[in-house]
Image (cartoon, grey):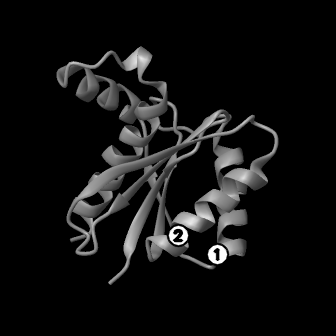
Amino acid sequence: MGRIMGIDYGMRRIGIALSDVTHLIAKGYETINWNGRDIDWALNRIGEIIKDQDVTDIVLGRPLRTDGTGSETQAKVEEFASVLEELYGLPIHYIDERFTTVIASQYLHSAGKNARKQKNVIDQVAAEVFLQDYLDTNR
């Protein structure tokens, strides 16, 4: 059984989390920094992780507004998802990512870390939060 990858897509950083092989536990893996324009480098890095970690499915955070309607970022996420699907042929599952960055910030704060100073960690922790939610829901 392969791993499931959680992706928190952003215009500057992409947070990556991975499940364990039993699909019980999610863990932050990496934050990919990119310039917001040249997505090829980020896609190649994601492809390396998919291959190295035997990823079989991708869970992508869907950025919704607090009222549940689509955000301006949602179209970019869907375009990103279609490129991922075309490149790697893996199933893409969407999950509501509302409040995951807030939860990640609280998690880091409770661990004694300043979330504002942890920009390279917060996105992967947000991906970990919604990937864990996906794993718990789909047991």
Type of the residue with mark 2: Ile
Nearest the camera: 47 or 10? 47
Give the numbered dot on residue 88: 1
Residue 44, how many percent across, how many down?
A: 69, 61
Mark 2 burial class by Cα count in 10 Å: few <14, some 14-19, many 20+: many
Could you tell me which quadrant the C terminus lies in?
A: bottom left
Label 1 to label 2: alpha-carbon separation: 8 Å
Q: Are marks 1 and 2 in contact (CB under 8 Å)?
A: yes
Type of the residue with mark 1: Tyr
Residue 53, how many percent across, how many down?
A: 44, 71
41 vs 117, left or right, is right
Could you tell me which quadrant the N terminus lies in?
A: bottom left
Query: Which structural element holds mark 2?
Result: helix
Task: State the residue at coordinates (68%, 58%).
Answer: 43
Nearest the camera: 12 or 29? 29
Residue 75, how many percent across, how many down?
A: 70, 46
The answer to whether 19 is drawn above or below residue 71 in the figure is below
Give the numbered dot on residue 66: none
Task: State the residue at coordinates (37%, 31%).
Answer: 99
Give the numbered dot on residue 50: 2
